[in-house]
Amino acid sequence: MLLEVKGVVKRFGGLVAVDDVSFDVDKGEIVGLIGPNGAGKTTLFNVISGFYKPNKGKVIFKGIDVTGKRPYEMARLGLGRTFQIVKPLMGLTVAENVAIGAMIKYPDASEALRKALEVLEFTGLYDKRFALARTLNLAEKKRLELSRALAMEPDLMLLDEVIAGLNPTEVDMVLDLLKEVNRKGITILMVEHVMRAVMNISQRIVVLHHGQKIAEGTPEEVANDPKVIEAYLGREEL
Amino acid sequence: MLIGAESVLSALVDGVLIGSIYSLIAMGLALIWGIMDVINFAQGDYMMLGAFLTYWLYVLAGIDPLLSIPLSFATVFVMGVITQKAVIDRILDAPMVSQITATFAVLLIIRYGAEVVFGPYTRRLTVSYLSEVLRFGPIVVPMNRLVAFLVSIVVTAVLFLFLKMTYTGIALRAVSQNREAAYLMGINVSRMYWIAFGIGVGISAIGGTLLATFYPIHPEMAAFFTLLAFIIVVFGGFGSVFGAYISGIIIGVTESVSALFISPTLKDVVAFLLFIIVILVKPTGLFGKEQ
Amino acid sequence: MNLLINAIRKNLNYLILVSVILLIAPAAFMKLNLPFPANALFLCLMYAIMAMAWNLLAGYGGQLSIGHAVFFGVGAYTTMILMLYYQVTPWVGIFVGGFVAAITGLALGIPLFRLRSHWFTLATIAVGEIFKLVFITWEWVGGSRGLQPPIAKSDWEALYFIQYAGPYVYVYIALGVLALELLVLYLVVNSKIGFYLQAIREDEDAAMSLGVNPFNYKMVAMFISAFFTGMGGGLYTIRFRFVDPFAVFDLITISVYITVAGIVGGIYSFIGPVVGSFVFVPVSEYVRAQIVSRFPRFYGLHVFVLGVLLLIISLIAPDGIMGWLEKKGVVKRRVAIPVEEVE
């Protein structure tokens, strides 16, 4: 088991954002984490990646108890992530952004840069390599974050809404890219509330609602689960 | 050294009175910060302008310091609006480093501009009726400080009513809670900004006017008061205006009591250390809400 | 290392030109008996050394300190005390001064780096004032009277205590320190440390997600920054042979000058702070020496001018002279490119 989330609870004041959620991610899988807005998906991501400490519960990564480890420690253990609200390093070039991700495995700056250009060719941002990150459009910024996480050569990637806000062509491009990434042996846990995209690509889906896990299973099982339908009904298109 | 109960009591009273002036300077800082999310390094220098204005009005035109309060507020309010339009407005979305250097540049320009104009001299303002001393049993209360204290209460009350009762005041508070939401509700945010900045520095100028009646007036006098204002704002909770009033008085008392026990030079060191300890230990202050 | 060699090869002509001018200038000033320009050159170099050091923390790491006088003062006092109380030659003392300043930086970094943006800046100002007040009351280091070194009585002692007439010799020493610093900083900013610092400046959360421990890298930057700023203090000690807390811990003429030099030159450019020092220090020194000293009534004019300069730069060209030149296409923005792509 690559990642085990065990009974995680995260409260903000009186608000319970994540309420006793447990699930596993196996090596090599693509798992989708879905739920309506405010379901606690991003909060759960922040707990797994070390940005928040859970009030209760455990996160186990590669067999190590990583509960409460800091984000940079998680990164060094092999966890790469993107952010829902993109956080490119605006004043640096695309190549520099990605090279900084690569430095975790390639501490020598020129080697990291070489690795970065390799990744950029793979993700299709090579032509933009010397552009400042702040000059990219949203789709490119999201691809940049993905490239940066990829350059870390992680075992597990947490992708927070890398598809939201993209047009259909861009969505297909990103999905193809993710399949390719997965084929290279990188496990993916992705948050998305555009369900169609996740259904396509995930082997397994976990559904959160009001901070609780209400369903888990293959895309078909989840899509036909009455609890899931109820949670989404009248809120989002399926 | 033996310190009698009477001198401690006097120090307490003195601390409350001087603290109320610190509060005025700090409240302006808290107001600007709460509403605009800008830290005004030059806050104390607007106070210094208020002090000089009061001095010259008295010396040149014989205007009583108490009467110069509205003039001091109005003049510095206008200067604040100019600063807001010319400088602050342009840096609201700039990188952090530019925000800091621009407000710091305003400090240098006002402080040393005043020094070039007024000369590097210390001046004192003596008004006969304000120099009298009241005695309450063993406690001695200088008239000028008592007046300053009373005025600070009035100013705070007016500010309180303004923020709670008037449309502009409520709009200001709305902007401080959520800039975008306020904008969507039809509040003219950029208008609120110059009003906030004007009022913020204007209140500090009133502090300067009051201070001028008993404190040496010098172009560089703001350095220590600005730092104190920061201590007070942090202590009172970031952006909490009335938290700033209470904590100003607490700081005033702490300072005057500790001056009894510690040497005057080290007294300042204590204040600086206090500042660093407070921002480290209690980053949301005593009265502030969690961010 | 490859990057360094490449950079040197690419800019060889300029480097030779600048080096030759800088090496000849002090000797020429001495021959022509022109102490004022030689002294201005010394000050430019001293501030260039400190502004470069400051910029590792402020420009690369995004941690804007207006309290670097602390490290300058500690370096200056350490060099002086070693000389005066322990007869240690400043040839060694300057380095020890840098090291003591660097350790001071680490000790201060522990609390200060818990603060972000404005609060960090404010706290550095407060720390600067604390150091000044403590040194004023500290009798062992001369209190408010300050300290003076022993006077050299022979040629040998003059060499040992580095005591020579006029500013000329000191210009060469400052040049040596600056060259050493540029070398070290160039290697640092083009290594993982430099890139990680920039990541921290741009977005601390993103940096952490990429495996960067912000605190550790800020401490590394602080160590190096304080070290060279402390060496600047040592240069001050040997050049002016007098240290007192008012001069070496001064908020305006040390901390703010360093900041302004950096901002004017351009904090997002490697060499910007040197450019800034060479542009700003002569102007400020001219105003101070020619106007303020002659007409003490106008004390403060030099700082006022500095404030106007800082404001204009902050509003109009926040990337400083170098950033402006890049925008105009006069110089190329330095971007990281792999070695093999450099022709």
Image: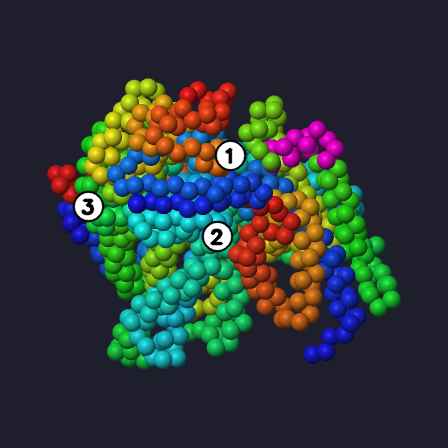
Report which residue position mark 1 lands on.
A210
Q: Which residue occupies the foreground of this view, C24 or B114?
A: B114
| Up-down relation of residue B70 to residue C179 (above or below) | above
> Element type at marker 1?
loop
Q: Earlier in the sequence, mark 1 or mark 3?
A: 3
Q: Label 1 is placed on what type of residue?
A: His
Label pair 3/2, CB-CB below 8 angstroms: no
**Separation of disc 1 and disc 3 at Cα?**
47 Å
**Looking at the figure, which quarter contains the N terminus of chain A?**
top left
Occupied quadrant, residue A220: top left
Residue B148: image location, x then y, percent:
76, 51
Residues marked 1 and 2 touching at CB (< 8 Å): no
Disc sitting over residue A110 in the figure: 3
Q: Residue at x 13, y 41 (%)?
A: C340
The chain ID associated with circle 1 is A
> Mark 1 against mark 2, which lies toward the viewer?
1
Residue plotted at (36% across, 49% down): A60
Q: Is residue A98 left or right of residue B155?
A: left
Circle 1 Cα neighbour tier, 10 Å, few/some/many (<14 / 14–19 / ≥20): some
Task: Answer whether residue A42 is visible to the viewer in this image.
Answer: yes
Task: Check if residue B166 falls in the magenta segment.
Answer: yes
The kind of residue on which mark 3 rests is: Ser
Residue C13 visible somewhere in the drawing: no
Q: Residue at x 17, y 52 (%)?
A: C1
From the viewer's perspective, tell me whether residue C247 is left or right of residue B129.
left
Estimate the x, y position of residue A163 in percent, counting from the top left: 35, 27
Q: Nearer the viewer, residue B239 or C268?
A: B239
Residue B183 against residue B9 in the figure, above or below: above
